[in-house]
Image: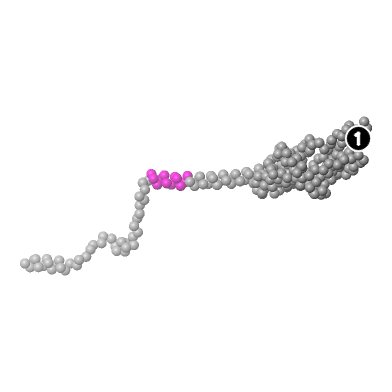
Amino acid sequence: MESTEQTLDDINATPATKTISQPLESSLTSTPTFRSTFPPQQQANTSKARRHWGWSALTHALGLVVGLALGATLTLAWLVWYAPSAQPALPNTATAGPGSIAITVDDAFLTNVTQAAISSASLPVPITNVHAHILAGDSIVITGQTPALPFLGPGHFSATAQPLVSNGKLSIHLLKGTLGGITAPTQVLRAIEIAINQQLDGTTFAPTIGNVQYVVVSVTTTTGHMTMTLEPQQDSQSH
């Protein structure tokens, strides 16, 4: 009996405690460790895809930079090859003599001639919606539209021309112009000038009246009109 009571006393004397197998401080401050739930092969594939995307983005960026640089280089090379320069006005001082006749043309006529000429010329860029306007003081303004040119501005063409008499025929001499917002290259102006004069050469401004061949000896302009003075050709008068 005594033994039983002692055992109960011993049990009652033992405090109800819970054994902690690690220090309290450690259990409170330890940080749980998280492990990836993806299998190793999937992690490797994800890393490889990220590297591929990075190289692809870098390649596209480099391609864009190279393309822009190449476009700018080609544009500058074109401008250097077609070095622009204004052309001087040429003398036009012939005077009319006895027996002369006059022929007058207007903006509409010259616009049709210029449109046909430019459409047939070999130009680096097409010029459309062409118009020609005759001004007083032996001057002609030619305008048109061009596609927008890279790095050069809006698509617009404008040129100033001078009417002349050459070998008994009316001709046009382009003095200066702009193409896409910059000074038009000399070769472009020259190509347009040749094409216009070829069109004018096929126009009968030097008629034969009776047995007399007439030739153009002078040309003058007012706003919207151009007047040519014709005289009998010297060889025709001698017959």
Three-letter residue code for mark 1:
Gln
In the rendered view, does 76 fall on the left or right side of 223?
left
- Counting from the top left corner in percent of width and height, residue 141 is at 76, 47
Residue in front for this viewpoint, 148 or 229: 229
Residue in front for this viewpoint, 32 or 13: 32
How many neighbours does mark 1 have within 10 angstroms: few (below 14), some (14-19), or many (20 or more)? few
| Residue 212 inside the magenta-drawn segment | no
- Residue 182 vs 116, above or below: the answer is below
- Counting from the top left corner in percent of width and height, residue 158 is at 73, 47
Task: Name the residue at 89% across, 40% down.
Answer: 100
Residue in front for this viewpoint, 58 or 3: 58
Residue 90, can we see it? no
Q: Which residue is mark 1?
A: 234
Residue in front for this viewpoint, 42 or 103: 103
The rendered magenta stretch, by its main secondary structure, is classed as helix
Task: Name the residue at 57% across, 46% down.
Answer: 64
Numbered range of the magenta stretch: 41-52
In the rendered view, does 39 fall on the left or right side of 125?
left
